[in-house]
Structure formats: C-alpha cells, structure tokens
Image: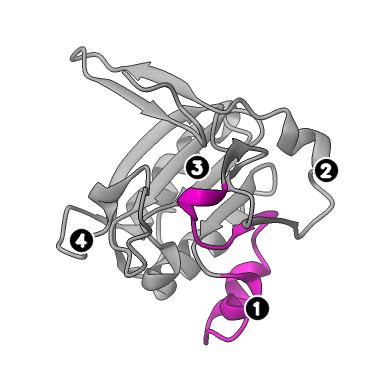
Amino acid sequence: MKGFPALPMLNLHAVQWHSRANGPGNRAVFWFQGCSFRCPGCFNPGTHSHAPRLLVPVSDLLDRIEQSQSTLEGITVSGGEPLEQAEGLLHLVRGVREMPLLSLVLFSGLTRERIQELPLAQEILASVDVLIAGPFVRELRTGKNLRGSSNQEVHLLSNRYDALHIAGTPVGEVHIDARGMVSVTGIDPPIL
C-alpha cells in the first residue's frame, strides 16, 4: 500500500497469485519459509529451513494484492509456519483487512489453544476468516476439507464462510507457469 511506513520483510518460500485449492474461491497464496515443527511426511519440506529464500517487504505484497484484488476472493497464508514470522504476518493480515472484499485463510501447525498463547495472536486472528490449526500427522492423513490430517481443526473465525465453502475447495491443482515450470499445490495434490 503506497505511503505506508517501512514494514517488515517476510521470508517466503513461494507465491501463487491464482489458486483455487488453498481456500474458497480464487486466492493468492503465500507460503512462509521456516518451520520448527518439521512434521514427518510434510508435503512441503522445502519450507522447513529458516535460511533466507525470498525476502519480500510486506508493503510490496500489499501493493500487489491491492492491484490484484478485483480478481481475488482472498489470500491464504501457509508454510512453513507463518506464526514464526508473527510481526510480518500481523502487518500483512492488517493490510489485507483494509481491503474489505478480500478474505483471509491461515494455516498453522499450532493448535488454536497454543496460538492464543502467543504475544501477537489476538491481533492476527482478529483479521483472519478461517484458521486451519494443528500439526500434520502422517498416520492421520485425510487430505480433505482443507485438512492434511484428521487432527487438524478448521476454525471459522468470521461469518464469511461455512462448512460447505470449506468442503467445496478442490483438494489439489497443477500450475504451469510461462517458463514451463510445473508445480502442484493443495491439501492432497496429484503426485507428478
């Protein structure tokens, strides 16, 4: 958002500007880099390292989101573990909340109870519409309703969505970019 004071940098793993498999509707998805949980069987182990990968100022992301908002239902933040970059996450979700047409979905490996113990949690969750909380457990793999494993819980934090919206989200998708690079994403995407 133009004119905002310098906002923190985020260490991102990847960005997908159009996705339908990471929450209801067409969404921009930001995968944060860094996760201390390192769940066995994690679909995205490349996100575990905290080493810098794609450093982006929050203000740049907000500018791009603002420019794209007419084509988006909302944004999804996943990981890695987004709450390990809580200050930057807070600035991101607050900025998106200022764009009232957009929704926010947040994935975390922490339970909701554990999230609520974190210093910035209440402020972050106040801007989130849907929270998918809990660690991925390979033995409980389910791959549906935005949950990788059955222990994870979907928390509807606003009245924007209901269980049918969550159930209607595709479990996976394939993307091919302009360079011919293929990527898969979602809760249970196809294996290529």
Category of crowding for the residue at label 2, using alpha-carbon neighbours closer than 10 angstroms: few (below 14), some (14–19), many (at least 20):
few
| Type of the residue with mark 4 | Ser
**161 sits to left or right of 182:** right
Q: Where is residue 1 in the image (x, y as percent from the top left)?
A: 44, 53
Gap in angstroms between the C-alphas marked 2 and 3: 25 Å
User: In the drawing, what numbered circle is on residue 49?
Assistant: 4
| Type of the residue with mark 3 | Glu
- In percent of the image, x 15 and y 60: which residue is there? 52
- In percent of the image, x 64 and y 50: which residue is there? 150
Q: What element carries label 4?
A: loop
The residue that disc 2 covers is: 162
Q: Do the residues labelled 1 and 3 touch (CB within 8 Å)?
A: no
**172 sits to left or right of 192:** right
| Type of the residue with mark 2 | Asp
Category of crowding for the residue at label 3, using alpha-carbon neighbours closer than 10 angstroms: few (below 14), some (14–19), many (at least 20):
some
Gap in angstroms between the C-alphas marked 2 and 4: 34 Å
Category of crowding for the residue at label 1, using alpha-carbon neighbours closer than 10 angstroms: few (below 14), some (14–19), many (at least 20):
few
In front of the other: label 2 or label 3? 2
> Mark 1 or 4 closer to N-term?
4
Gap in angstroms between the C-alphas marked 1 and 4: 25 Å
Please tell me whether residue 146 belongs to the stretch shown in magenta: no
The residue that disc 1 covers is: 113
The residue that disc 3 covers is: 66
Gap in angstroms between the C-alphas marked 4 and 3: 30 Å
Residue 95 visible in the shown view: no
- Give the camera-side residue of 82 and 127: 82
Please tell me whether residue 132 belongs to the stretch shown in magenta: yes
Magenta highlight range: 111-140
Q: What element carries label 3?
A: helix
- Give the camera-side residue of 92 and 34: 34
Gap in angstroms between the C-alphas marked 1 and 3: 32 Å
> Mark 2 or 1 closer to N-term?
1
